[in-house]
Image (spheres, helix red, strand yellow):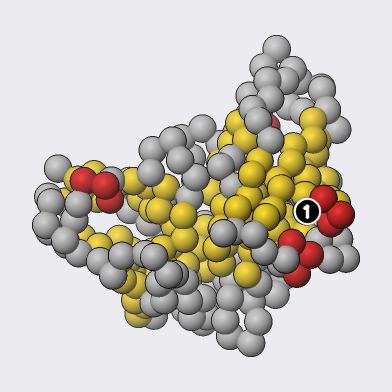
Amino acid sequence: QSALTQPASVSGSPGQSITISCTGTSSDVGIYNLVSWYQQPPGKAPKLIIYEVTKRPSGVSNRFSGSKSGNTASLTISGLQAEDEADYFCHSYAGSSTVGVFGGGTKLTVL
Amino acid sequence: EVQLVQSGAEVKKPGESLKISCKGSGYSFTNYWIGWVRQMPGKGLEWMGIIYPGDSHTRYSPSFQGQVTISADKSISTAYLQWSSLKASDTAMYYCARHRPHYYGSGSYFDYWGQGTLVPVSS
């Protein structure tokens, strides 16, 4: 089972919006609305920020939003802040034989 | 408050055995799956396996089947990840995380994470 495809890096200036893509296949992202996103600041543990494509856990800023079209899911961060600088990973359910598959991760740099 | 607290860093040599732990609190430990996730230096996340502490039912990723053993002691709300013979390639940060499984079109995510246990393996 191959990892989901994410860009290695994205960057943006404070106040701007950025979007991180996560491309899978018709066996994972394309068929299930079960994509989640995780934020991992440098040297820290991952934190859930989006689940089931568009839902935000309690306490997560509404500057984070998720969407999906076909085999590609996306994470959008609006009003970029310096504290958003982190690695971001997507994850998708991929059928009953597995817990799922992660993306390779995207490093967000806030300029 | 849900918390997962992992055991501390362990420096090991190839061939040695190791068991690291993950203690849950702030929720009913027996009723939620716990997963283990590997992150090799500078790399992404890989799920290794999950366990349901209520009955110790376990599922492994094919990549880790036979390489590690996942267990749990529900009496002390603790899950474990162990190796019988470490290799240098096992050098990584290991995270435990509470897993919400797929259930009727919802779920399939890790909602709370431990702080990680660093395992350097070097001769």
Image coordinates for residue A28, horizontal then vertical, percent: 53, 73
State the residue position of label 1.
B77
What residue is shown at x 79% (from left), y 35% (from top)?
B19
Amino acid type for the residue under numbered disc 1: Ser
Is B36 situated left or right of A104 in this image?
A: right
Image-quadrant location for residue B55: bottom right
Examine the image and state in which quarter residue A95 appears: bottom right
- Percent across and percent down for residue B56 are 86, 61
Tell me how many marks there are: 1
Residue occupying the point 57% across, 81% down? B106
Q: Chain of mark 1?
A: B
| Vertical side of B102 occupied by B40: above or below | above
Q: Local crowd at mark 1 within 10 Å, few (<14), some, or many (≥20)?
A: some
Circle 1 sits in a helix, a strand or a loop, which is it? loop
Viewer-closest of A59 and A84: A59
Q: How far across and down, in percent of the image, does residue B91 sit?
A: 63, 29
Indicate the position of residue A69 as horizontal and vertical percent values.
Answer: 35, 80
In the rendered view, would you say A103 is above or below A93? above
Quadrant of the frame with the N terminus of chain B: bottom right
* Direction from residue A96 to residue A72 in the image, left or right: left
Using the rendered image of the protein, determine whether residue B31 is visible from the camera's viewpoint. yes
Image quadrant where one finds the C terminus of chain B: top right
Front in this rendered view, residue B47 or B72: B72
